[in-house]
Amino acid sequence: MLDKRYPGPENIHRQMLPNGITVLALENNAYPTVIIEGVLRAGAIQDNNDKAGLASFTADMLLRGNRQYDFVQTFELLESIGAHMGFGCGRHVTQFAGASLIEDVDLLLVLLVESLRSPTFPSQHLERLRGQIQTHFQIRANDTRQRAALAFMEALYQDHPYGRSIQGYPETVCNITRQDLIDFHCQHYGPRGLIITVVGAMKVETAVAKIHSILADWENPKQAGLPQVGDMPRPKVPVTVIQEMPGKAQSDLILGLPGPRRSAPDYIHASLMNTVLGVFGMMGRIGQTIREEQSLAYYASSHLTGGLGPGPWTADAGTAPESIPLVIEAIKMQITRIQNELVSPSELEDCKSYRIGSMPVGLETNAALASTIVDLELYELGLDYLQRFPDLISNISAEQVLLAAQKYLSTEQLVFSVAGPQANGKPV
């Protein structure tokens, strides 16, 4: 049964423009604002090893000036109407978002579209941003959690695009030129596959007409499509990487393995399984046992990424260096348990209630609605997905949770990444 409390095909208007842009619009008068959010299919998987970070650098430069407005003019105009907008780069897409009052949406659209279509990549701002990125790398190099995460991805996804840092590395960002940014924009930015969503106090017909008037003429015959990303096999034996960081008080641990794509038919089973394992309550069974009962970690949880490619399933913890082996053993015990025992009816119902009950909270704002609608389109979930979601969760059985754990988890084919003050040998 569809839950009509949530947006669906009846009120989410979807239209594809002739140039390949998908426009989605939802009228919501609860707030006097309009949110414009979307994704363009250009991301870090289109980088190469020598220029890792190029896609991210390009996205970060979009606000630094375009053919119509320079950097100062753009921010003065945004400030004058109390609006904001931004861009960010992921592995497969570049995200964009903006927000304004309804009376200022035309100016917001102009600023957003000009930044997307005609950035000028001014040299002085390029070097300033390069310096900021290098500062970020210095912070990353001195942060145990970030070091553990970076080493984990590099070890798990060897010879795979996911193994490269989205932001790049000090030596690769140094090599990126202004012409590289121009070329990346020319080759990968364009209308095909672009998704743009408008949510707020505006009629859907008006929203679609505004997007059509400003974007329907965008063409880029050179626009390259996203490359296919292959699956990533699990390591045949456990792999351990250790980043020794003298002077730190805490060690951070990440362990995991490649997980399912968002499009996998049983992804939602795996998602609920992960809710039981490391999300619900005090971060699920992992958090409850490791943090609350055994006091072994400052935090402990698990995560299932799910996306256009084989994102990882991970468990992480921050702990004292000497506790790393104990934490690993405790996480592996919880993996073994969920792979061999049916989740009890009461625990399963609690986790289902949490997932279903938290959805309205996650859709309270126009920004949250816009982001969710973009995901519905990007992952081809269907405009009725939110209405189907409560039933999808309710109908998952303990047996399906068990099968998902057996299929997607392992205690033997894991990558372990530790960053902290002392190595103490392999912690497995």
Image (spheres, helix red, strand yellow):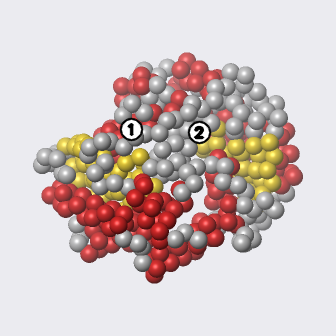
Q: CA distance from mark 1 to mark 2?
A: 21 Å
Task: Give the number of the disc on residue 102.
Answer: none
Q: Secondary structure at mark 2?
A: strand
Residue at 52% x, 35% y: name it.
229
User: Residue placed at 53% from the left, 20% from the top?
Assistant: 180
Amino acid at the residue labelled 2: Thr
**Which residue is at a point 86% across and 45% down the rendered structure image?**
209
Residue 304, given in percent of the width and then of the height, sits at 45, 55
Kind of residue indicated by mark 1: Tyr
- Taking 204 as reference, is 49 left or right? left
Looking at the image, residue 245 lies above or below residue 159: below
369 vs 388, nearest the viewer: 388
Residue 76 location, x and y as percent? 66, 42
- Report which residue position mark 1 lands on: 157
* 152 shown above or below 295: above
| Image depth: mark 1 or mark 2 in front | 1
Splitting the image into 4 quarters, where does residue 115 fall?
top right
Q: Which mark is residue 94?
A: 2
